[in-house]
Image (cartoon, coloured by chain):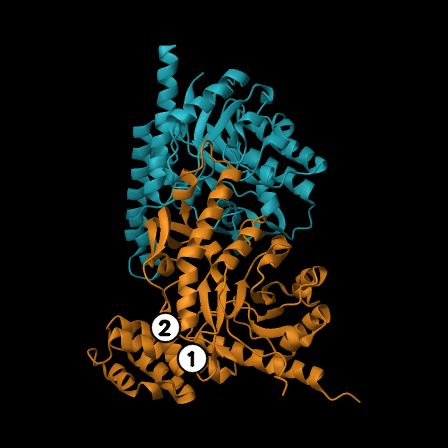
Chain colours: A orange, B cyan
Amino acid sequence: VTAPLFPAQEIGSLMKPRWQLLGQRGAPLDDAAKIDFERWDRTLGFSHDSPDAARALLAGRNREASPEAVRDLGALFALRLFEAAGLRRVYDGEARRIEMYEYPIRQMHGFQFVGHVRSFDNKYYLKAANTDEVRLKAPYHIEEFDFVRRHATAEPKLPVTGAYTLADWSYNEHYLGRQAGWKGRKERREAQRELIHAIARHALRPTLAALIERGCRVIQIDEPAAGTHPGEGDLVAEGFNVATEGLDAEFTMHICFSDYRNLFPALLEAKRCRQWAWEFANRDRDGRDGYEVLNVLREYKDPREVGLGVTDVHRDDLESAELVADRIRRAVKILDDPRRIWVNPDCGLRTRSLDVASAKLKVMVEGAAVARADFERPRA
Amino acid sequence: VTVRITLTGPFPRSEELVGATRDFDRGRISADALEEVYAHAEAEVVEIEKRLGTDRLTAGYLRWPDLFRSIAEGWGGFSVGPVTRWFETNTFFRQPILNAPPERTAGALSARLPPSLHKEGAGRSLVVLPGPYTLAGLLDNRSGETAQALVHRLGRLFAEEVRELKGKGFATFEWVEPLLVYQPPTPTLAESVIAAYEAIGAAAQDSLSLLWTYFGDAAPILPLLARLPVSSVGFDLSETDPASITDRLGGRGLGLGVVDPRTTLSEDPGHIATIVRDLQGRLHPPSIWLGPGAPLDLLAAEPAARKLHVLAAARDALSTTRRVE
């Protein structure tokens, strides 16, 4: 039996529903939050696995609807939303996570948070300095994976922030301080390599091993920082390789909003990566030019799967199923093998409302079906 | 030669200001309450600058969302575009979109300078502005103008800006030009850069103008930098090997980015002094400005303040040496 072409997956976070935010703070739900909860529950039935917590939350009985119970409801909600959209691989919309940097760093020794740094406008992130050897406190994401494994009906795919990104978003004191003399570009790069290896070896790899031990089979390594420094594709690959060395699971790598060409050919060395899950729709215009960068895989004869971003996560406008199908067709034409393609949003959908996110995922799945009909049509 | 210290762009927002801007965006505090926190935060930066003896005051440019917003919102022809990565950092700016040939709006930039600068005295203040090459290169040009024409036109508009600001008493201008070293201009475009700075230079006579480069190695474009009519040229010494600065830059002053805002690791003032003395001995610049290699807002506020202290200590070390000699 051959699996259907163009299976769909999600990439990362969903916006947390307002009832979850209120409930986790111990605040009573207002009418709008209750209506929203009930509307989604009618569609998704996400409270069936936790009916007592749902009733308590709606009734404002905070003791019974503990922050943990509400958080679990949020995870169930995301799981069911993804599954209802028809995705083959799902996770919990990162319902338990606040962001993708601070939490993993807090699971490690060797870092000190030094304050907020502006990302843009009035958006900031809490940034840490690496001040000592990296050591893992305890493997992380375990509890959330266990929960997803127990409740998912589709296949879980766990997203984990990669070593390169964790290092790039930190200040490097410990390893840079060991470099003698003036700290130029060469010295910074060498110190960064040491930090990436340390995170990958001493924190990420044991975490991945523990997750695999508990049954995690598909792991997405998120490297949104991969495109920050054009000449560092080798460091991205090294971080990936050290983190996954000797581990038996299916690994994918998500990169977005980057010039992927700058990472090649160095990134080809990430040998255990089975799939590149990249953003394309954001840069796509009428001529499907957003997908031209796939030619880099063709040029290097790289046969891996592609997680094809067919949905722009920065726009509310809903793509049509035909547009999604057209994007898939363009990718097939370049890659010359429809079996290599998964479809996904460009990135996590957390910046879209849940209604928009849900609609975009459904259209994505419909578009995949339209394209599938092209390629699976019996030939005369 | 007098060794001065300066900032090269914005100072990071304090934790209090971070919280206040977040609260304001979420509707938790009023505009007046936010303004109070801004004023307090600016006063704190001015106090640090005065205490450490920075040569010109900046008040940290804390209200600026990014280097270009005052232009994109204040001048004609622009709109504010998508969030875009700021060189090789994890910070971003909103890309200006140029929909038509740019037009300067009188008073627009002056109104967007930190209010503390007007209060402290324009003559003691540093006006930080994007250089014409960097602005032209990073905006989304839908105006129909060629890159060369645009750089030249922006130079003329900035010259008008300088005339207006000089009229208000400002006398020191810093042109921020990371793109000059990150992606040096083609020979043809370089001529437009020179023409732009000639226009600015004519307007800036009798005032100080610093051109500051960062995020790239300046060594390959030293001949171009030597042709730009500015008082001093600044280098990011984490990117430009001090030994590679061999050109006397036509007698221009040297800006030396000797602390690195990409790391919280503290530099050694003694080591900095050694590097500066070497450059001083080889190039005999008429003036030396010590600054951060790139804007300090790549750091959080507390480590940024520590870097400023390192600058002051390095300056003091150089002054002490001179007195001993």
SS at mark 2 in the image: helix
Q: Which mark, by number, is residue B201? A: none
Q: Which residue is nearer to you in this view: B4 or A230?
A: A230
Q: Which residue is nearer to you in this view: A379 or A241?
A: A241
Q: Which residue is nearer to you in this view: B204 or B11?
A: B11
Which one is in front in this view, the residue at disc 2 or the one at disc 1? 2
Q: Is residue B204 above or below residue B88?
A: above
Residue at x 56%, y 68% (from the top left corner): A312
Can residue B290 be seen in the rendering of this structure? yes
Residue A290: where, in percent of width, then height? Answer: 65, 64
**Residue found at the far right of this picture:** A380
Residue at x 59%, y 74% (from the top left corner): A342
Q: Which mark, by number, is residue A144? A: 2
Q: Which quadrant holds residue B46? A: top left
Residue A151: where, in percent of width, then height? Answer: 39, 82
**Label 1: few (<14), some (14–19) or many (≥20) C-alpha neighbours in 10 Å:** many
Left or right, B163 with respect to A3, comes to: left
**Label 2: few (<14), some (14–19) or many (≥20) C-alpha neighbours in 10 Å:** some
Mark positioned earlier in the residue sequence (2 or 1): 1
Amino acid type, callout 1:
Leu
The residue that disc 1 covers is A79
Left or right, A255 with respect to A324, comes to: left
Image mark 2: chain: A
SS at mark 1 in the image: helix
* Separation of marks 2 and 1 at Cα, in angstroms: 12 Å
Q: Is residue B262 above or below residue A155?
A: above
